[in-house]
Image (cartoon, rainbow, N blue to C red):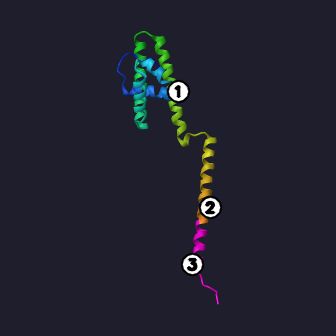
Amino acid sequence: MVGKVKARRLSRADWEMLLRQYEAGNCVGDIALATGLTESWVRHKLWKHAKDEPALRAHHHMEALRRELIRAEAELLNGNGDKAVKQMRALNMLVKLEKELQRASRPEHTPVSEAEDIADVRAEIERRFDRLRAAREAKQLSERDDGCGTSNAD
């Protein structure tokens, strides 16, 4: 999360930000210290929310980013310009990173070298299917020859 969590009830969006911190490598102890909760409770909630569907997690993540933006704007309105600028820069970096990750995950936006790798893999799969089809057809032909052919035996 961008800032330290104050003494308030954590929403699902807040837990999503904490879960992403954990997935990024922060330890449960640090998250518990920042939130003022016990490590066992934080571990339980992280485990519980990690099982949510990706679309739901993405929704909560965007909600958390919007909340942080509102908090930064409130700081700006209260005259804490330096703090607001720091929060907005951090949010801007997070949003750019998120967009970059989403863009890279779509096949039409993958770099050319990755697209060539994908084409190579597809070509290899097609070659393997062709070999399997040829082997199956050869087996079917040999079975027909053995079972129903005419015999030249005297």
Q: Which mark is residue 147?
A: 3
Q: Residue at x 41, y 25 (%)?
A: 40
Q: Answer above or below: position of 85 versus 14.
A: above
Q: Answer above or below: position of 95 versus 148.
A: above
* Nearer to us: label 2 or label 1: 1
Q: Answer above or below: position of 8 versus 103.
A: above
| Nearer to the camera, 119 or 141 | 141
Q: Would you call the spot at circle 2 few (<14 residues within 10 Å), some (14-19), or many (20 or more)?
A: few
Looking at marks 2 and 3 on the same chain, the residue that comes earlier in the sequence is marked by 2
Q: Image quadrant of residue 76?
A: top left
Per the picture, the main secondary structure of the magenta-coloured stretch is helix
Looking at marks 2 and 1 on the same chain, the residue that comes earlier in the sequence is marked by 1
Q: Which mark is residue 131?
A: 2
Could you tell me how far apart the alpha carbons at marks 1 and 3 are, in whole angstroms?
Answer: 65 Å
Q: Is residue 149 inside the magenta stretch? A: yes
Per the rendered image, the range of residues in magenta is 136-154
Q: Would you call the spot at circle 1 few (<14 residues within 10 Å), some (14-19), or many (20 or more)?
A: few
**Residue 102 point in image, percent of width and height:** 51, 35
- Type of the residue with mark 1: Gly
In the rendered image, the quadrant that contains the C terminus is: bottom right
- Type of the residue with mark 3: Gly
Q: Which mark is residue 25?
A: 1
Looking at marks 1 and 3 on the same chain, the residue that comes earlier in the sequence is marked by 1
**Residue 113 point in image, percent of width and height:** 64, 41
Residue extending farthest to the front is: 40
Residue extending farthest to the left is: 9
| Nearer to the camera, 94 or 147 | 147
Please report contact status of discs 1 and 3: CB closer than 8 Å, yes or no: no
Q: Would you call the spot at circle 3 few (<14 residues within 10 Å), some (14-19), or many (20 or more)?
A: few
Residue 62 appears in the rendering: no
Could you tell me how far apart the alpha carbons at marks 2 and 3 are, in whole angstroms?
Answer: 24 Å
- Type of the residue with mark 2: Arg
